[in-house]
Image (tube, rainbow, N blue to C red):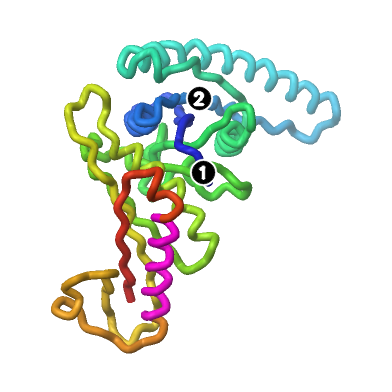
Amino acid sequence: MLEPIKRVLVPLDGSRRAEGAIRYAKRIASATDGTVILLRVVEIPTQQADAQGYLDRVSAEYKLTEKSDELVSSQSKASMPSAQATRTVFGEKYAIPIPTLVKPTGDIIIEWAVAEENKVDLIVLCRHGNNGSERPLGRVAQEIVLHRHPSKPILLVHEESPEFKRYDAHALVALDGSSFSETVLPPAAYLIDALGTPQKRERVRQQKGTLHFVQVVKDSPEPVVKVLDNPFEQEQEKYIDWPELDKAINYLRDMKKTFNDELGAVLVLQTDGYVVT
């Protein structure tokens, strides 16, 4: 079983957009008495030597190495004011020195996160960083989300999201009946439990977060949204005699029971289920 989220990694690129993920990471880490890790990856401009012989290639590589050293040195110095500001805003407990590494951005973030010695439990990042884009995901976010190797759970934050102030946190968990889709349940549960935990300075009563299990079933005779165990079902919904619908309903009921048996005793969460056709 997945352990509570203790170490939260936030990749940064020096932009205000990327820093928007810090407030979510701080809230999660605060709930578990954990740590926020700020990682700055420095991208080195690529340089291709022309094909004029071995000496030319060696010369180009040497110049690129010199340029890399200069850029890393300048970026390391530039990172320090950002790290100091983070300590001032979020407190000494949540900030550690920012490691500066030179490698392809998406790859190094994933490699760093999965390394055993770093013990990262969750990656939190904004959709876009330094280069704003019309696309749903920026280049680095897309590299991380679609990385070919196994990674860690990822929380993708919209850079224009309002300040998070809700204590009855909700998560929509999409399931398709496969064991692969069910692997999202433990991290989603711990995430909602952490986001729903009031900060120490907030005088609010602990409230329950909710996981909404959803399964979409194709080719239904007619569209319907089936709410599991709805006491007003006969009044609010039309019953459809369709085996695939019954199969999905029974599956979600089993998933709710399994979840409550395994994590219900550890986390204070509510669950419900919906079948959408």
Measured as percent of width and height from the top left, residue 202 is found at 20, 26
Neighbourhood count class around disc 1 (C-alpha, 10 Å): few under 14, some 14–19, many 20 upward: few
Tell me the amino acid under the disc marked 1.
Leu
Q: Quadrant location of the C terminus?
A: bottom left
Measured as percent of width and height from the top left, residue 232 is found at 16, 73
Residue lying furthest right in this view? 54
Q: Which residues are magenta?
A: 245-260
Neighbourhood count class around disc 2 (C-alpha, 10 Å): few under 14, some 14–19, many 20 upward: many
Instruction: Give the dominant element type of the magenta stretch: helix, strand or loop.
Output: helix
Q: Which residue is mark 2?
A: 40
Q: Is residue 248 magenta?
A: yes
Q: Report helix, strand or loop for mark 2.
A: strand
Tell me the amino acid under the disc marked 2.
Arg
Find residue 201 and report its image quarter. Answer: top left
Residue closest to the eye, 243 or 65: 243
Tell whether 116 sits left or right of 79.
Answer: right
Which of marks 1 and 2 precedes in the sequence? 1
Q: Is residue 94 magenta?
A: no
Residue at (61%, 50%) from the top-left corner?
A: 148
Tell whether 62 sits left or right of 248.
Answer: right
Above-or-below relation of 176 to 193: below
For marks 2 and 1, give the CA distance: 27 Å
- Is residue 20 among what the camera can see? no
Q: Which residue is mark 1?
A: 2
Residue closest to the eye, 65 or 192: 192
Above-or-below relation of 147 to 15: below
